[in-house]
Amino acid sequence: MVLFALLSVVSIVFGIFSIYDKNQLVGVQKLLGYSSFRIVWSHAVNNWLVVFAAFSLEILMLRIAFSQLDNSIYPILFLFQLPLLIVLSLDTLIQFLLVHRQKATNFIKQNLRSRLLICVVCGLFIFTSGLCVYMLRVIDYQSIQIFLNAKKMQHWQQRNDNYVLSEISAGNDSASFTYQSNKIDHDLQNFYTQIADKKGVFLAASSHFDQSKAQRQLYQFWGLPNLPSFSLLQLSPSALKKYHISNNQGQSIKISNQDKTKYYLIPDKFRNNLKYQRFFKKFALINSTVNPSNKAQVKQFLDSHPVQIVYYKNTRSFASWDSSDSRSLKLPIIEVITAAGLDTDNTSNMRVVGLDNLLKLDRKVVASTAFKRAIANSDLSDNQLVFRSIKDSLLSDRSNYFQLLAAWGSFLFILLLAILQSIVSLNLIWQSSHEKQLFVQRLLGYSSCHKYRFIYLLISISDLIAFIFGIAFRSSYISFGFVILFALEMLVIYHSVRKVEFKKISEELKGLS
């Protein structure tokens, strides 16, 4: 959509400029009896040829890439070209109205008057400025992602050997990806159950629950007591063993993957705070479809989802498993996820690509025959699961961010050309339609700023609004980008005005006569 809008602006601005740039030629053609359509077509035919050539090249490249291309693809390709064809038709119509409504002498004397066209070019300039704000915002976002990616690389450096899911295809389970079926969730649960007890297989994730107003309202809706902000660390029994966590009696906490009970390990510091017990006994309700006002439903749900609270002693901090937050976890609530106790949220998370996937694997596990057998036995072969190391996954993300940044940067460059061209076109139209007025003002000693105050005000107000948006969005790219753009626009308008201002008065008198 952005590319389409960009092509639309560039096409219309250059279409209008082509008429004004060759106004004397157009005037001679009108005097020779050329019809308005014939004149316009001679200017617009190049645009249509470019679209036709691009369409032909697109078909040729598809033919080369896919030798057995179905012929039914051609109507679809044509439909995708329709928006651009409509824009070209609109561009041709604007040129036709311009040529048809003006007299031949106006073209020859370069004395064109058209408030409509001035409004159109002003509108296009404002639109392109708004589009520039959006593009700079996207580039700012991509730059932030690259910065965060670098932080993740540093934070996850000790876990580069862990593998995560990096690719998954729909295969025969397309209905699962449109939430019309939960087959793939059952398949992933079956897959994890087969490998859960193997060395190097574990679940790990962390998140933070703040005390925001929305969070408090959520607790109140589900009938949960209000708790201070806390961190939740989700671990499988195998991951729990790595931390050597002990209970208040000094015994190591061990939980079996066959246990269907949901375990919450709460720091011994909160033993006397009964709110924690009441909260986590009902915590599973938040992700359920139970009506909280129906007590019978709530009781039935809680009875079928048993929860056990265990208090643990630990003074050290835990490393974060949250891809967006690298802060260490102090006294977190630990939720133990067993293979038998996986819920729908856990299994749905297992198809998430990247670091946020619960499932973490060792390199040897991924390469093992038992791992591949578990995929085949779980009917996941058609989903073509690809596991990569955390380092490779982050490098792949970085590559994607840089590619997107380059693509948006190229769009922005084209848009800047369109903005500068629209200023040149606007100035040319303004000079042609106010030639006598500008000449008189020049004789009276008016400054260029006063004579072209409309254009200067348009540029200044538009860029000032964009600059304010940049401050509101806290985007340095938008703010500094429009400061640079304002300087370029002033330079272009100065250069465009300078041609007229430095022309001798005698030459202007000849032009006016």
Image: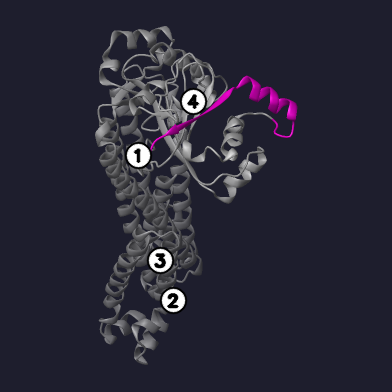
> What span is in magenta?
291-316
Task: Specify the amino acid type for callout 3.
Answer: Phe
Please report contact status of discs 1 and 4: CB closer than 8 Å, yes or no: no
Between label 2 and label 3, give the one nearer the viewer: 3
Please report contact status of discs 2 and 4: CB closer than 8 Å, yes or no: no
Q: Is residue 9 left or right of residue 25?
A: right
Residue depicted at x 40% and y 66%: 467
Report the residue marked by disc 4: 346
In the rendered image, the vertical position of residue 345 relative to residue 477, given as above or below: above
Residue depicted at x 37% and y 25%: 239
Task: Specify the amino acid type for callout 1.
Answer: Arg
Report the residue marked by disc 2: 454
Earlier-in-chain disc, 2 versus 4? 4
Please report contact status of discs 1 and 3: CB closer than 8 Å, yes or no: no
Between label 2 and label 4, give the one nearer the viewer: 4
Inter-mark Cα distance, 2 to 1 = 66 Å
Q: Is residue 82 magenta?
A: no
In the rendered image, the vertical position of residue 468 relative to residue 280, given as above or below: below
Report the residue marked by disc 1: 316
Between label 2 and label 1, give the one nearer the viewer: 1
x and y percentages locating residue 135 in the rendered image: 38, 52
